Structure formats: structure tokens, C-alpha cells
Image (spheres, rainbow, N blue to C red):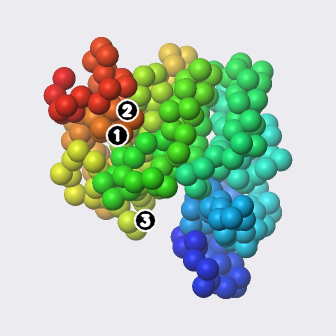
Amino acid sequence: MIAGQKASLTKSQIESMWAAFDLKIAAPLRRHQIPLGLTIGNHDGSGAIKDQTLIFQAERNLAQAYWQHQHQFLNFVDRANFPFYYSFQQNKIFFLVWDASTSQISPQQLEWIEQTLQTPAAQQATARIVLGHLPLYPVAKTKNKPGEYLEQGNKLRSLLTENHVLMYISGHHHAYYPGKVDNLEMLHAGALGQGARELINSQLSPRQTITIIDLDLAKSTFIYTTYDATTWQKIALEELPASIPTKNVTIWRHDLKIPDGKSIDTPKNSNNF
């Protein structure tokens, strides 16, 4: 609903979009006191840098101004850099949100991520979940190029794995794919609005989706339930490709057992085990 990342937009135009978002999305959630965790994306507060300068600083200022005056009903652990990167706890789950509105994670933010994941609050939580806009690796055909996924995907994945993070939830590619690499679950959220895209290694038509995650903390297990947001029919995992090959890794569908030796090297035919 915030269609920014455009130099021609005026301040009043961007503020009008935030007002519409508040009316349609945020206000109803506030009325029911439903907690809302968010991660900034490239269209509402891009962190893109050129010549060591933030290109969309004005948009980021407006995004920050909007969120600083909203009540998310969250139990913040660290909100010093909210809404760009911060942490909170909810129902014994530790959530870390990083600023993946661009493909580059700054050294300052990377240091914060490493320190935060080592804190007692993070380590003692029943589960740890990380949210960011760009994925670690590409999953959509038209986004399979540098700048459309995080530059340090392997390093960031290792960091999350070492700190026993359960899953990384991302968007940006607008293509639903519940995947995993080694022990890290990666939920690539589909688009609920415009711009649904086709998955790599798939002939499925693009579709709008919404995903619900049911967590069983006692058993450390979870279930994804995903719906086609147009028909409200459940999407069966078997409809999705068994794997998505990328330059550095193969992403396997989360319900499948990863074949021995296949977590890093991309198989010649990723549809076959």
C-alpha cells in the first residue's frame, strides 16, 4: 500500500499512502489489540545507498515518523532503531527484525545482529525467528539477479544457523515458497497485493497468497497453512517444486528430507532425488 521508492513523489503523496495504510490495516488491528510485527521494505523505506548517501532518506524519515507514533502491542527487547531493525518477544518466541530493504546489510547492523542473537533473551527463548524484506537467495524468476536478494546470503545463513534460529521470513520476490537450507527454515512469503511472480524451477502461474504458521512450542514443530488469496483454496505443498537451485545453494521444500550431500551443491536435476 506504500508505493514509494520513487523520487518524483511528494511528501504529501507519501503521507496520504501511510494514512490509507493506517485506515485499512493498522487501525483495525489496533482496535482489536492484535500485535503487529513489521519489517521495512524497499517501497516504504528503502535503505539503498549511492555515493555513501541514502537515496530515499525522505521516505525513510516518513516511515519512521509514522511507526514511532503507533502502538504495535509488542513486548520490545530493543527498539532503539525501530522500525528499521529491532527485536521483541511474543509467547516465548524471540523475534529479530533486520533492515533488508536493500541487498546490503550494513556493518553496524551486522554487528548488532550478532550481539543480539547472543543475548540471554534470544538464547533462552523457546524459538527464534528472523524477519527481513529481501530473501537470502532468489526464488522468483524475474528476481534472480544481484540486488534482488541479500549479498551476504551464505554468511547470514551461517550466522542464523549457529545461533539456532528456527526460520527466516522474507518477502520482496512475491512468490510463496516454504524452503530450507540445512537446518534453517526459510519462508518466502507470497504477495497479498499486486505483483505475484512465478517461482524458479516451476511452471505454476503466479498467485496471491497468505500464510498462517501454527507453532507447537512444546514439540518445537510448526505447520504452514497457505491459501490462494483469490479463491481461498489451500495450497498443497506437493504443488510446489521440490527444490529451487540458486548460484550458491539448493533450497529444498521444507517438508522434504534433504538428500545426503545435497545441501550445498546444486543437483543437476533438482526435481529428482
> Looking at the image, do the residues carrying marks 2 and 1 touch, with CB atoms under 8 Å apart?
yes
Q: What numbered label is drawn on residue 249?
A: 2
Callout 2: SS: loop
The number of numbered badges drawn on the structure is 3
- Please identify, in this view, whether the residue under mark 2 or under mark 3 is nearer the observer: 2
Residue 198: % across, % down: 28, 55
As drawn, 95 above or below 221: below
Q: Which residue is drawn at 71% across and 30% down?
A: 114
Q: Which mark is residue 1?
A: none
Quarter of the image containing the N terminus? Answer: bottom right
Q: Where is residue 232 in the image (x, y as percent from the top left)?
A: 31, 54
Position of 5 with respect to 96 (left or right) is left
Nearest the eye: 126 or 7: 7
User: Which residue is the site of mark 1?
Assistant: 246
**Amino acid at pointer 3:** Gly
Three-letter code for the amino acid on which mark 2 is drawn? Val
Find residue 226 and report its horizontal and vertical position in percent: 36, 45
Where is mark 3, residue-wise?
193
Q: How far apart are marks 2 and 1 (CA)?
A: 5 Å
Give x and y (percent) for residue 91. Answer: 66, 31
Residue furthest toward the front?
51
- The amino acid type found where label 1 is placed reads Thr
State which tag comes first along the sequence, 3 or 1: 3
Q: Distance between the residues labelled 2 and 3?
A: 29 Å
* Cα gap from disc 3 to disc 1, whole angstroms: 26 Å
